[in-house]
Image: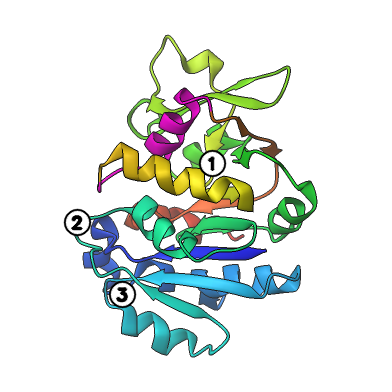
Amino acid sequence: MKLILLAAGKSSRIFDKIKTNKCLINIKRKPLIRHLIDNAKKVGIEDIDLVVGFKSNNIKKNLNDSSLNYIQNKKYNSTDMVFSSILALQKCKSDAIICYTDIFFDKKIFKYLIKYKSSNILVPHLKSWKKVWNSRKKEIFDDAETFITNKQNNLIVEIGKKINKANYKNVKGQFMGIIYLPQKKIKGFINSYEYYNKNKVQFTEFLNFLNLKNNKISTFSYNSFWYEFDDIQDLKSFKNKNV
């Protein structure tokens, strides 16, 4: 199992406030990205790629970890997270977990993904998303996206669209920034991105594209703690939670 951590972007919505890479925000006495690395290793994931770009030396110096494989996204200014993941996937010869680095969650989700052994792309969703959005002081109709599932087979029907009053009742959770990709699906994933031919694409938008192209994407609900640091308000709200 390979873990691909995405940390190439500038994170412009928060960088001017914190003056460092977002993945280096200190939470519970260590950087966000170190929590992810440590949790992965605790459940037996040792093969870890870290895709970097903006101020990459800051990340390398802070982690000082020779066990990591660094991949440089030289086009970080003109690309997005999907492109960063493609850089790592091109030489991947195992199942992979792709993970954002501005999120904080319990290690058991890595453990579950290892055991699940899905033959489909697998994207967990946050069941308690409304509670989290409220704690982050986010407006659902401005900030959240659709995550609609088929109850019969736990497949995603729609992801990444704007939530409105008409579809709100159908939203079962929220995307968590975590994607499991079986090795046999990697080539198709890469080919689909090349076909999509759009450098700046959000992951949820691309996943919805894959779904529309008849790629089955499975899901399961996650009920434990999860939090995202998107802007300075998220950081302030988290510090008031005493987690």
Residue at figure coordinates x 40%, y 22% from the top left? 163
Q: Is residue 122 left or right of residue 146?
A: right
First to last magenta residue range? 199-214
**Residue 32 position in % (x across, y down):** 50, 69
Q: Quadrant of the N terminus?
A: bottom right
What amino acid does circle 2 point to? Ser
**Residue 235 position in % (x across, y down):** 41, 59
The local crowd at label 1, few if under 14, some if 14 to 19, many if 20 or more residues have their Cα within 10 Å, is: some
Residue at figure coordinates x 25%, y 70% from the top left? 74
Residue 205 shown in magenta: yes
What amino acid does circle 1 point to? Val
Label located before the other in sequence (3 or 2): 3
* Residue under pointer 2: 78
Quarter of the image holding residue 119? top right
Q: From the viewer's perspective, is residue 51 above or below residue 167?
A: below
Label located before the other in sequence (1 or 3): 3
Label located before the other in sequence (2 or 1): 2
Residue at figure coordinates x 60%, y 63% from the top left? 93
Which label number is shown at residue 20? 3
- What main secondary structure does the magenta stretch of the protein show? helix
Which label number is shown at residue 132? 1
Viewer-side residue, 227 vs 175? 175
